[in-house]
Image: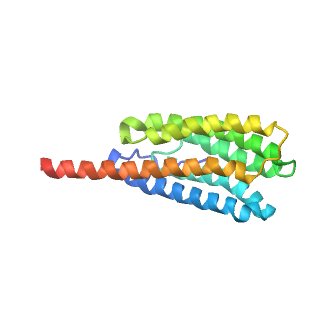
Amino acid sequence: MTDIHFKQPSPAQGNQWLKPYYFTRAIVSILWVAAAFTVGTHIPAVAAGLLVIYPAWDAVANFVDSQRNGGLKRNPTQALNVVVSALTTAAVAFALGMGMNLVLAVFGLWAALSGLFQLATGVRRWKRYGAQWAMILSGAQSALAGVFFIRQASGPGMPGITDIAPYAAFGAFYFLVSALWLTVSDARRRKADLIND
């Protein structure tokens, strides 16, 4: 993979990017969850497509975000997330032919790894951009959800897309909280700057 942008943005520039980025990720996840609970529960081909699209979107989103924040070399946790999500996309496509239990196990491994990478990214960005506590919580919860998925996949029941959709819903919630928190933080900073001027 080739880095496109190498310049590290200032905190203000970073926040200007992170706000719409987090809002976009929240909206996409909400739409995915809505599709999973409606069309996905009735049309297996749509459910299969949604299951492949979800990690693929994560790979693309992390790649674009890393480019806007100095490139993959400066964002190793996101670089790893891009690789893991891309591999997961291919693994899910393969697992769909083997059964939903294997699909859930693949999602579990991905959720655990990508959650840890997201947590590490949040910790690394905290000092520079602030308002990363929601991303850190999201990463930790994703890792725990991954362990739960792996255990559930080995059970006797037949999982479906609705078993994965709540995981995506929580992701949407945390991205939305992060976007709103950055918006409020920026508004307070601008107000303080006006008072000081």
Q: Residue at the location (14% across, 50% down)?
A: 195
Residue 122 vs 25, above or below: the answer is above
Relative image position of residue 119 (x, y in whole percent): 52, 36
Q: Say whether residue 113 is visible.
A: no
Tell me if 13 is positioned left or right of 82 in this view. Answer: left
Picture quadrant where residue 145 is located? top right
Comparing 129 with 47, the one in front is: 47
Which residue is at the far left?
197
Q: Residue at the location (73% across, 61% down)?
A: 40
Q: Residue at the location (54% across, 52% down)?
A: 172
Relative image position of residue 81 (x, y in whole percent): 61, 42
Tell me if 86 is positioned left or right of 124 in this view. Answer: right
Which residue is at the far right?
98
Residue 58 vs 108, above or below: the answer is below
**Tally of numbered discs:** 0
Tell me if 102 is positioned left or right of 179 in this view. Answer: right
Q: Say whether residue 102 is visible.
A: yes
Relative image position of residue 28 (x, y in whole percent): 57, 59
Tell me if 59 is positioned left or right of 52 in this view. Answer: left
Which residue is at the far front?
157
Q: Residue at the location (66% across, 41% down)?
A: 84
Comparing 168 with 52, the one in front is: 168
Residue 163 vs 121, above or below: the answer is below
Image colouring: rainbow
Comparing 156 with 172, the one in front is: 156
Relative image position of residue 181 (x, y in whole percent): 38, 48
